[in-house]
Structure formats: C-alpha cells, structure tokens
Image (tube, grey):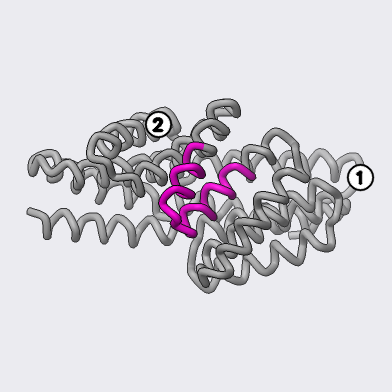
Amino acid sequence: MKKEIDELNRQGLSRYKVGDYAGARDFWQKAAKLAEQSGDESEIANSLNNLGLAYKDLGDFLDALRFFQGSLDISRKRGDETRVAILLGNISIVYRRLTDYESALRFAHEAWRVSQKLGQKKRIASALSTIGNVHYALRDFQGALDYFRKSLALCEELGEQELVAHRLNNIGSTLMDLNQLEEAEKHFEKSLSVYEALNSKHNVASALCNLGLIHFKRGDCDEAMRFFRRSLAAYEETQDKYGTAIALMNMGRTIVKAATQKKTFKR
C-alpha cells in the first residue's frame, strides 16, 4: 500500500508544481484515503498537509485550515518537529489570507522558533518570508523588506532558485508600495524569468500581475491591461479562485482609470 500512496503523492506533487491544484487535490485525496486505511500516522499527516496545500491554493481557506490543523495535531503527537515547523508556516499563510494578522504572526513566529531550534536554513528562510508577508499585509513595508532580504540571502546561499524567485517577487511588491517602481520592476522581471523556466504557472500569474501593477501605477493602462489579461488566463488555467479574483479586480481598476484618462484599450 505504501508504494501506491507514494505514487499518488508523487503524481499530486507533479500537478501541484505546474499549478494544477485541482488535479493535485484529486491525487492527494486518493492518497489520503489509502493512508487512513493503512493506519500509518506519518502518511496520514503528510496526506492532510498536502490536501491543505491544495485547498489553500484553490482559495478554500477554511478547508485548508482543517487539514493543516489535523496534520499539525498528529505531527506534534509524533514529535515530528520538521513537519510541525512546516505546518505552523502553512497555517500562518491561511490566517493571513483570512486577514487574521494576529494569528498569522503568532504561528509564523512559532514556525521561526522551531526552525531555529532545528537549525534548518530552508525552514528558517521560509519562516522569515512568512513573517515578512504578514508585515507587508499590515503595511509595515520597511519591516517586510528586512525579513524578505534576510530570507533571500538564505535562499541564495542554499541555491534554491524557486525560493529565490519568490523572495524577489516579495521584495518587488514591497518596493512598489514604497514607490520605487524601477527597482520593483527589475525584481519582478527576474522572478518571472525563473518561474517561466520552471513552468510554475501559478507563480508566473503572480509575477505577471505584479508587472501589470507597475504599469498601472505609471498610468500606462494599455500595458497594465495586457499583463492583467495574461495573469487572469494563467490563474484560470490553474483554477485559482483567489488569484482570479485579484486579476479581475485589477482589470476593473484599470478600466476605471482608463475611463478617467478618456482612453480605450488596444486589442
């Protein structure tokens, strides 16, 4: 049975990495069912965490919390501190999406403490970025930059290209809100290049959306709309409801801005 579970998890991860979250969920649901039948707590905890990831990226945050918390309870019982650190970070992300920033910071700092105790640089880098994202949501941009840059340095040291791209994207977003548009654009372009090379569709969508925002802030509605349309298509392809909503909102804002400029869009 373990071989079947491993294969289903592998196929789910393959779909997840290319942004097919619904496909990943379907494989991981089958793996979770087999894990329950096996009674192996490690496999059950892993399956619940995987399902939490899929539901988080599909925008179903309450289901994501339910799966993450179930996995956390089992992992704490088993003394699996590495998985505990991962789950604390995942739960923080969901609370941030739900705008419960107090809970988000509490779980993120706990993830950082556990990771520090374990001495795992990759987990430390993840926790630092999670904390940075909460500070960003709270509009503490200088605080966010500090955490993102510390995380970026660790990611570069580890040679983790996808994580480097994530941090470049984070830093770009923060610089954009500080109105440092040229530097922000450079960070977004670098991150987009990495995401495209990795065929990470969800992250490509995010980077495209951010480049659209740069042009929006400059008042170039044609270029902004072009990037937002590409972002929307990528989000829809991955069935990311949260990202789709963000892209549509940005397109609406651009239409309103263009109207005030008495402009029509190029096709």
Determine which of the numbered discs, if any, sits on residue 262 in the image.
Answer: 1
Q: Nearer the observer, disc 1 or disc 2?
A: 2
Number of numbered discs? 2
Q: Secondary structure at mark 1?
A: loop
Q: Does the magenta run of residues contain 114?
A: yes
x, y percent for residue 232: 59, 51
Residue 230 in view: no
Residue 247: name its quadrant: top right
Instruction: State left or right for residue 39 relative to residue 193.
Output: left
**Residue 201 versus residue 226: which sits nearer the camera?**
201
Determine which of the numbered discs, if any, sits on residue 65 in the image.
Answer: 2
Q: Eyeballing the image, is 17 above or below 64? A: below
Determine which of the numbered discs, if any, sits on residue 196 in the image.
Answer: none
Query: Residue visible at 71% across and 50% down?
Result: 146
Q: Residue furthest toward the front? A: 117
x, y percent for residue 174: 74, 49
x, y percent for residue 18: 43, 61
Alpha carbon separation for disc pair 1 and 2: 45 Å
x, y percent for residue 184: 77, 59
**Residue 67 versus residue 259: which sits nearer the camera?**
67
Q: Residues within 10 Å of mark 2 (few under 14, many from 20)?
A: many
Q: Is the magenta region chiefly helix, strand or loop?
A: helix
Q: Secondary structure at mark 2?
A: helix
Query: Residue visible at 49% across and 34% down?
Result: 107
Q: Does the magenta run of residues contain 253?
A: no
Q: Which residues are magenta?
A: 110-132
